[in-house]
Amino acid sequence: MDSTPKTGKKASGELPVAPRILVVEDDSAVLQVLCEQLTELGYAVETAADGEIALMRLRLRSDIDLILLDLDLPRMSGRELIGVLSAGGSRVPIVVMTGTDHATDRIYLKRLQVAATLAKPFGLKVLAKAVSDVLKPLKAGAKRPSKGRKTTGPHKLHG
């Protein structure tokens, strides 16, 4: 398994750009660990503690390649954020992290074509594989996600 990120396509004379991940998690200890792990894997990381902050960051940055999203968040839940992004036409792939495995969540996430679901707790290998699999098109030199790019479809990973 090659979980080392391949950087996006570079223009002539420019340095390669590390894929940028927005991590949305309200538990500061979990957020810190995720940021450390993703940075160690070579990704650029942005953070948000709730859905409202995440939405603001997404509106300010056009270079987010993937959203790593907890479902249970204060102010605006992960479910609500997914709905807002979907209604707005966002095509940035979303990997959901959840400590629960409710049938209604699985149906909802499948309908919205969430790229992957990680059942908490999960290890570094599972995280690395999920992120790597979802970002494969970017690694191959595709353009960064935009409102015009579809997500890859639902996958469920455990570890």
Image: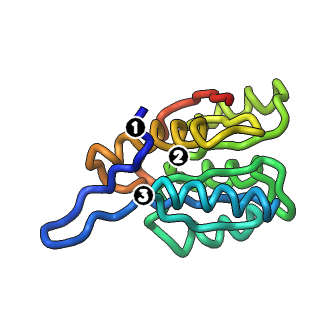
> x, y percentage for residue 22?
58, 61
Q: What element carries label 2?
A: loop
Q: Which amino acid does label 3 sit on?
A: Pro
Looking at marks 3 and 2 on the same chain, the residue that comes earlier in the sequence is marked by 3
Q: Which of 148 and 60 is in front in this view?
A: 60
Instruction: Give the residue number, with chain letter if any, for mark 3.
Output: 19
Q: Disc 1 designates what residue?
A: 2
Residue found 63% across the figure and 27% down from its top: 156
Does 68 sit above or below residue 57? above
Q: Which amino acid does label 2 sit on?
A: Pro
| Picture residue at 42% right of the left edge, 56% below the top | 146
Where disc 1 sits, the SS reads loop
Query: Which percent across, then down, holds residue 30?
Result: 76, 56
- Residue 33 lies, with reference to residue 102, above or below; the image says below
Residue 101 appears in which quarter of the rendering? top right
- The residue shown at (71%, 70%) is 53
Q: In which quarter of the image is the C terminus?
A: top right
Q: Distance between the residues labelled 3 and 2?
A: 12 Å
**Mark 1 or mark 2: which comes first in sequence?**
1
Disc 3 and disc 1 in contact, CB within 8 angstroms: no
Residue 64 x %, y %: 49, 61
Q: Mark 2 points at which residue?
A: 93
